[in-house]
Image: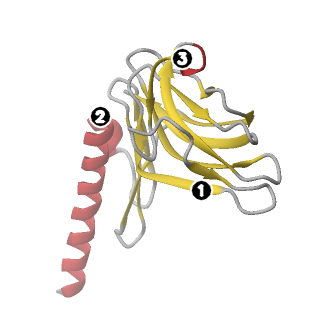
Amino acid sequence: MRRTLESVLTVALIVLTVAIAAFTLQLPAAEAQSQPPGVRVYGNNPANGRAAVATVDDYGVLFARPDHPARWLDSHAGIGATLTQVVAAPAATLSLYVTGYIAGSTTTTAGQHLPRQGTGTNCGTGTATLYPGSANTTATVPSPANTVAPTSVTFNPPLKLAAGRAFCILGVATNTTWIAVSGFTAP
């Protein structure tokens, strides 16, 4: 009796998992039902920016990870006291979502940096500070010397930029900063 109940619950969980994946990804019903248990369901709907990977193991345990096919990783070095574009602006209807970055000094002298967003050349128009607070206009986030570990920042949930805005960094005059930033583009 217990084994039958476990089997019924496992099947119900698999059906529920496929239904959630089909709803989230807006897959056609026939495609969603064709996924066997224990197999990953991949999908992407550029119209609504949703993407997901759902996996069910042989025991019916669901693993779900939000992800996006429009992932990017960009880097830039030698950023001084001038606002510098690191990630180009997407189309006007799309936004950059920053999931994290690492940054440090290119020299043995520590400095600071400030993540900002904007439009135009090097975010020169409509500039706004992203982190650590919108009121900051000078570089305040540490850029450690190149002899120590860099600053590592993770945004969970991702940091969403305004639609059609680029990701830029402002450094300081006493040294230059390098940065590697990751994220994805979506509506």
Quarter of the rendering containing residue 177: top right
Query: According to the image, label 1 marks what residue?
Result: 152
**Looking at numbered disc 1 in the image, what kind of residue is underneath it?**
Ser
Q: Nearer the viewer, residue 116 or 158?
A: 116
Q: Residue at x 32, y 28 (%)?
A: 48
**Residue 149 seen in this snapshot:** yes
Q: Earlier in the sequence, mark 1 or mark 3?
A: 3
Q: Please name the colour scheme applied to the rendered image.
A: secondary structure
Using the numbered discs, state the Cα–Cα distance from disc 3 to disc 2 in whole angstroms. Answer: 39 Å
Q: Position of residue 12 (x, y in %)?
A: 21, 63
Q: Position of residue 83 (x, y in %)?
A: 61, 27
Q: Residue at x 36, y 69 (%)?
A: 61
**Looking at numbered disc 2 in the image, what kind of residue is underneath it?**
Gln
**Looking at numbered disc 3 in the image, what kind of residue is underneath it?**
Gly
Is residue 88 found left or right of 126 in the rendered image? Answer: right
Query: According to the image, label 2 marks what residue?
Result: 26
Residue 124, disc: 3
Residue that protrudes farthest toward the bottom in the picture: 2
Is residue 172 shown above or below 148? above
Q: Residue at x 48, y 28 (%)?
A: 117
Using the numbered discs, state the Cα–Cα distance from disc 1 to disc 2 in whole angstroms. Answer: 35 Å
Mark 3 residue element: loop
Q: Position of residue 138 (x, y in %)?
A: 53, 38
Q: Position of residue 67 (x, y in %)?
A: 45, 45
Is residue 169 found left or right of 51 in the rendered image? Answer: right
Is residue 158 found left or right of 109 in the rendered image? Answer: left
**Residue 69 seen in this snapshot:** no
Q: Earlier in the sequence, mark 3 or mark 2?
A: 2
